[in-house]
Image (cartoon, grey):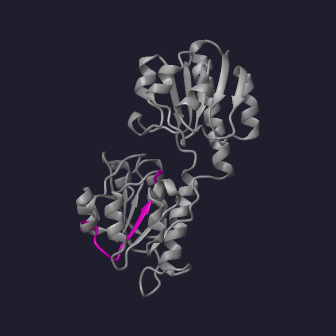
Amino acid sequence: MFQKLVAIEPINMNEAARARLYDYAREVVLCADRPADDAEIIRRIGDADAVLVSYTTLVPRAVIEACPRIRYIGMCCSLYSPESANVDICAANERGITVLGIRDYGDEGVVEYVVSELVRLLHGFGAFQWRDVERELTDVKIGIVGLGTSGGMIARALQFFGAEVSYYSRTRKPEREAEGLTYRPLEALLAHVDILITCLNKNTVLLHEAAFARFGNGKILVNTGISPSYDIGALRAWVQNPGNYYLCDTDMAMGDTTLLALPRVISPRKSSGFSSYTIKRLSQKVLENIETYLKGTGELA
């Protein structure tokens, strides 16, 4: 059992899961707002040996080194790699601190967002219509960059609607190619497709000026990540060309909210990966991680 567990910011767990936290720590502190700076994070952690954090606050080396009693950090958000994490995992590892994150808790909503927004844009159900004549997803050439869990789910959904789906990923996915997906190197993918969907880890930028030039005009870009998949200046120039559309769900994904003033930039400015089911999945996975850690230390029977 932990001596003290502190959630340094709101963590999107349901009430039942919050109550369960008291089974794992003698003292539990759940902060209701985001800390203003590192000094405030350090103050909130204090002598805690367990910390919970969401995706909106950074926990850098300076914070980790200033809080010597930490032995566990639970990320109540996606953890794909140390490079993309908002916790300095290398600094934590150096001090013997275990960092566990979660995955695959909000992907269903992301799939629904992509299908919904593309259908609206292709049919002209909203303020914009992609082409002069309404069309279905059938036979539309769509490329997916990043075929992880969400990218794979989006691919299957679009295939269901009859789209011609290609993908680029750091590693080939033979099992998905057997299902009808076509692998293309990134440059070839950009030149081939009319709609490009980026499903990349946080802070992964693949689209620069040359990539947009190869992608061309009269196209649609959808970003499903939680940070820009593109150079913002290059995106700004590209989306102002005739017939180009850019879609994303949140301000973090956009990277610069002044883009909203440009024509054909469409965003609801709310997370598509957030729902009552997202909270349920997130809560369960956060608790499972705590139990995994405590069982490993022999502190949970």
Q: Is residue 224 magenta?
A: yes
At horizontal 38% and vertical 36% (from top left) the residue drawn is 83
Report x, y in % for residue 3: 67, 16
Q: Nearer the viewer, residue 9 or 139?
A: 9
Q: Nearer the viewer, residue 130 or 48?
A: 48
At horizontal 56% and vertical 61% (from top left) the residue drawn is 269
User: Looking at the picture, does residue 21 appear above or below residue 198?
Assistant: above
Q: In which quadrant will I find the C terminus?
A: top right
Q: Would you identify the image quadrant in which residue 82 lies? A: top left
User: Looking at the picture, does residue 289 appear above or below residue 151?
Assistant: above
Q: Residue furthest top?
A: 298
Classify residue 62 as left or right of residue 243: right
At horizontal 47% and vertical 84% (from top left) the residue drawn is 134
Chain part drawn in magenta = 214-226
Q: Nearer the viewer, residue 20 or 159?
A: 20
Classify residue 184 as left or right of residue 38: left
Q: Is residue 219 magenta?
A: yes
Q: Nearer the viewer, residue 176 or 270?
A: 270
**Does the image show residue 244?**
yes
Report x, y in % for residue 171: 31, 45
Report x, y in % for residue 163: 42, 69
Q: In which quadrant will I find the N terminus?
A: top right
User: Looking at the picture, does residue 294 appear above or below residue 201?
Assistant: above
Classify residue 7 as left or right of residue 114: right
At horizontal 48% and vertical 32% (from top left) the residue drawn is 87
**Does the image show residue 224?**
no
